[in-house]
Each structure stands twice: as C-alpha cells, then as structure tokens.
Amino acid sequence: MRLGGVRTAKPSRVTAAVAAGVLVAVVGAASAVAVVVARDSRPAPRAAAPTGPPVTSPSRIVTASASASASADVVPWVDDPVSPPPPVSPPPTPKPPAPAYRACTAAQLSAALAGSQGSTQHVESIVALTNVSDVNCSLSGYPTSLVGIRADGSKQALRPDHQSFFAEGYSWPANLEPGKTGRFAISFTLGCVAGSAPDPSHAFTQAVVGLPGGGTATFSTKFATTCGVSVTAFGQPAPPPPDLTGKYPGLTAKADFPDTVVAGATMHYAVTLTNTTSEDMRLDPVYGQWLYPPKQAQFFKLNCGGAATVPAHGSVTYAMQMAIPATSSDPAKFSWQIPGSAEAFSGFVLHVVPAPSSSPTS
C-alpha cells in the first residue's frame, strides 16, 4: 500500500527452500529457537493520493534554474499550483460465492506442505490439499481442530486463532475437480518476549487438521507455538481486483533525483514520462508530489504548454521542483504521481542534510 503517495512495505515472499531452513531452525534447537526471516524490499500496492490542502511553492522558487534537470531536452517547470483532485474510489470488493459441491472429506484428500513465506519474524506454512478421488468436492471454512505432533511423537491439541499475518488469505471456496488442489496455511511468530528463548515443548514437526467435511488430514510441517499459532480458512485466494489502469493507461513515470538535498532549500529533479502504447498520448494532467516526514503534499499543473503530447513508444522529460522544509528528517520518503494513474508513479528515498550554519561576523 502507499499512504499519502508514499509506498509502505509489504511482507516479502520467501522461497520454499529458505523458509524450510527457517523452520528447521525453529524446531532444531532445544534451548533457543531463532527464526530469521527476510526483510521486506518490495513495494506495496498503491493507495489513492491524499486529499489535504495543497502546499503551494514559496515565491522564492522560480521556473527551473541551472540544475541537472534544466537542459534543452527538458520541458521547464511552471509554478502553477492547483487544488488536490478528488480521490478515486476503488470498486466494491466482491463477496465469495457459496461452495459448488459437497464438502471434501478426509478420504478424498491428500495433504502436503506446499511452501512457506516469512517476514518480520512471522512464518507461514502453506498446505496443499489435493482431491485424489473421482468425485468433485469443495474446500471452505476453517479447520475444526489442530493437533501438533512433536519430534518424539507426543501430541498436543492446539487452539489456533483464525487469521494470518500475510495478505494472501484463502477466503474463496476451492471447488475441486479430481486432481485439483485447495489450500490453507498455518502461521506463527517468535516476535514476542518469550520468542527469544522459546520452550522446546512448543516446537512441532507434524500437524493434524480437522476437515469441515469430516475426518482429519496429517502432514509434515515445522512450527512453534511459543508466541501463538493461527490458521487461515480452507479454499483459494480471492480473484484479483479489476485492472485499474486509471488515467493514461500505458503511461509510466521515472524520476531522476539528486542523491542529497538540503533542508530548507529547493530540490530540482526531473520526471520522464514514457508512452508504452502505439498511439500518441495527449496530456493535460495534474501531478502530485509528496514528502514524508514532515507530511507535505503539493499539486501542480504539468507544463503541457512546453510539451502536451508523449509520442507513441516515446518519452518526454519534465523539470520539477519542490521546497524541502527545514524540519525535514533524514531519510525522507518522496513520491511523484499523476493522481488516478496506476502506472505514472515514481518514489524514492531522499538523504536530507542540515542547512550549513552561517559563519559568525567579526
């Protein structure tokens, strides 16, 4: 997701091999169990632009000065602030349909670990349940029970929560023809105080899950319950939302920005708009630029008097400016976007240095 035009992190997917190694570490140590998971490096889905009042540029900022972005090949910046455009409302989330067939029973299914993912000390084991019968059946609803089996064969009935740290929940029923597969997931974390030295009795190497259609399924998976455990519903992920290309489909943006900016000064940069379609694209847009921290949003008219059309499979570069508040922190998140356009977006992190102090006079 992006808040205020700035991207926020979303948990990254860990390969099955890496996550399997993580899970082995969870249950292999008798006195201390440590889970190391990948830090997020992937950008989230973008949210709509913020709608607060615009912050107009100070009068001391003038049309592009002698900077890297002010050249003969760059359309000059114009100081033409506008009010924020109205936000774009997302389409309503579709409701899952009812299962198409009778609930799958244990005799119809084969269960096996299908992979894992992890982020910020959270691990999720994904379990695949394949219809091995010759009759259609449906998977939906939550497990009716969960039993953990330790490496020594001892068992413990567990009380899992119904949730997941990760977004890919299995909220739609999986209508399984013979040979087709549905899924659910077991999630756990060691991100609590006790997780730094978990009790080995809370480590399990197998799980037995109760099925809504009757019976149980047993499969191998390594997980720990020191900080709790949760399960998702059986089924499949919801279908993706409609492709919201919004304004100017096929128009992409790439910002060219300085490595370092000075707090209280003006940042000069450039944005290149590229038309990936086979038709010329005429522009008359408003663009927004966001800085955090502090929270600041500005909206301007693009200088379409300098260049109103991006040719088919071509690019146009526009000079840009933004006043960097004296209160800016280092680092600061910055983003540029044509509001309502899913592709005309570029974001980056600014390294902000304090303004040089004036020398005392004698």
Image (cartoon, grey):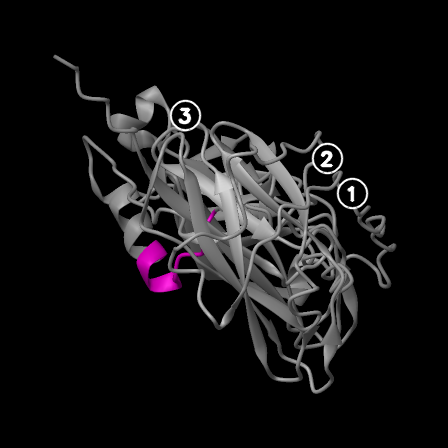
Tell me the distance, in whole angstroms, between the alpha carbons under discs 3 and 1. Answer: 29 Å
Determine whether the residue tagged by mark 2 lies in a helix, strand or loop.
loop
Tell me if I can see residue 205 in this picture.
no
Q: Is residue 338 above or below residue 294?
A: below
Tell me the distance, in whole angstroms, between the alpha carbons under discs 2 and 3. Answer: 23 Å
Q: Which residues are magenta?
A: 11-19
Query: What residue would you read off at disc 1?
Result: 87
Q: Which label number is shown at residue 51?
A: 2
Residue at position x 73%, y 76% in the image: 281
Which mark is first along the chain, 1 or 3? 1
Q: Which label number is shown at residue 348?
A: none
Q: Amino acid at mark 3?
A: Ala
Query: What residue would you read off at disc 3?
Result: 326
Residue nearest the observer in this picture, 246 or 61:
61
Determine whether the residue tagged by mark 1 lies in a helix, strand or loop.
loop
Residue nearest the observer in this picture, 178 or 182:
182
In the rendered picture of this protein, how many numbered marks are placed on residues? Answer: 3
Do residues under tags 1 and 2 come within 8 Å of each other at their CB atoms? Answer: yes
Is 12 inside the magenta-drawn segment?
A: yes
Residue at position x 68%, y 57% in the image: 237
- In the picture as drawn, the residue positioned furthest to the front comes out as 362
Residue 8 coordinates in the image, percent (x, y): 51, 42
